Image: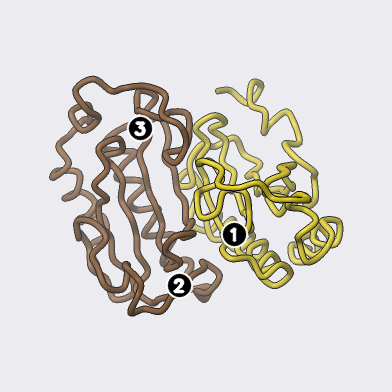
Chain colours: A yellow, B brown
């Protein structure tokens, strides 16, 4: 996949929240998993090991900052971190707050659903998504 | 979950390959994904952000070393990295080599299967698992 064909090079890929020199952060629109953020490395590289050591640390410290916001704001059952990229091989990290009541828990978000969430997942979060987004922005302010 | 009830505190959780002061590495027995390694943090902590900054770097540099071995030895279509822990909330990282011919590609390993792999996946790897394990061991030698 060339950058010209790559959706993460040509599209926002979510609600843009943070724009940094080497990476950006978006929130993914997913009704089942509303607290779902994605860190997208700007350079069109496929694998985590394509980064140098300083870049890897920078990347994971930003991922960790997002994780911390989700933990403190939402008290989730678990945080899930993943970089897969099988469909879009451009380095991006998924950071997802999981709850024991969510549609798939304890299955991975890519696994089978386990239940319906009456009223929708977003309504059960401890704070509105706009407020959560603001905390993510603040945590990643340069 | 207390350490006494935690399978990653009380069991090996795979074929033991590397034993380090703060983490260990096993290979997971999965017929669909034979090149599947797992780094298990020794302390019974749930989340990546429970580590301090130096520990996070140490953890991800070890994950990266495994990723590099898989890339160089197997030329996979993609590497998948994930720490989920919804079932076993003890910090562990999955490092999986994925191939465009594998049973689930491009789906996540936790998603729906896409095909049968005639002859089994292990037979298609560029080198025997014992040789791959040896390279992982060598890469993580202290």
* Relative side of B18 to A80, left or right: left
Q: Are marks 1 and 3 on the same chain?
A: no
**Residue B27: image location, x then y, percent:** 25, 52
Q: Which residue is mark 3?
A: B76
Q: Are marks 2 and 1 on the same chain?
A: no
In space, the residues marked 1 and 3 are separated at their CA atoms by 26 Å
Q: Quadrant of the C terminus of chain B?
A: bottom left
Residue drawn at 23 percent across, 68 percent down: B19
**Residue A56: image location, x then y, percent:** 52, 55
Q: Which labelled disc corresponds to residue B55?
A: 2
Residue drawn at 66 percent across, 41 percent down: A42
> Is label 2 or label 1 in front?
2
Quarter assignment of residue A131: bottom right
Q: Are marks 2 and 3 on the same chain?
A: yes
Q: Which residue is mark 1?
A: A58
Quarter assignment of residue A5: top right
In space, the residues marked 2 and 3 are separated at their CA atoms by 28 Å
């Amino acid at each position: 996949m060339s950058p010209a064909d790559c959706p993460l090079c040509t599209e926002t890929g979510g609600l843009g929240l943070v724009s940094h020199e080497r990476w950006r952060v978006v929130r993914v629109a997913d009704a089942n998993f509303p607290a779902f953020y994605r860190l997208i490395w700007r350079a069109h590289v496929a694998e985590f090991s394509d980064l140098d050591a300083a870049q890897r640390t920078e990347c994971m410290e930003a991922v960790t900052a997002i994780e911390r916001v989700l933990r403190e704001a939402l008290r989730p059952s678990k945080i899930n971190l993943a970089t897969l990229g099988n469909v879009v091989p451009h380095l991006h990290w998924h950071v997802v707050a999981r709850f024991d009541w969510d549609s798939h828990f304890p299955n991975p978000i890519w696994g089978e659903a386990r239940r319906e969430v009456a009223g929708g997942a977003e309504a059960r979060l401890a704070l509105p998504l706009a407020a959560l987004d603001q905390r993510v922005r603040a945590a990643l302010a340069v």
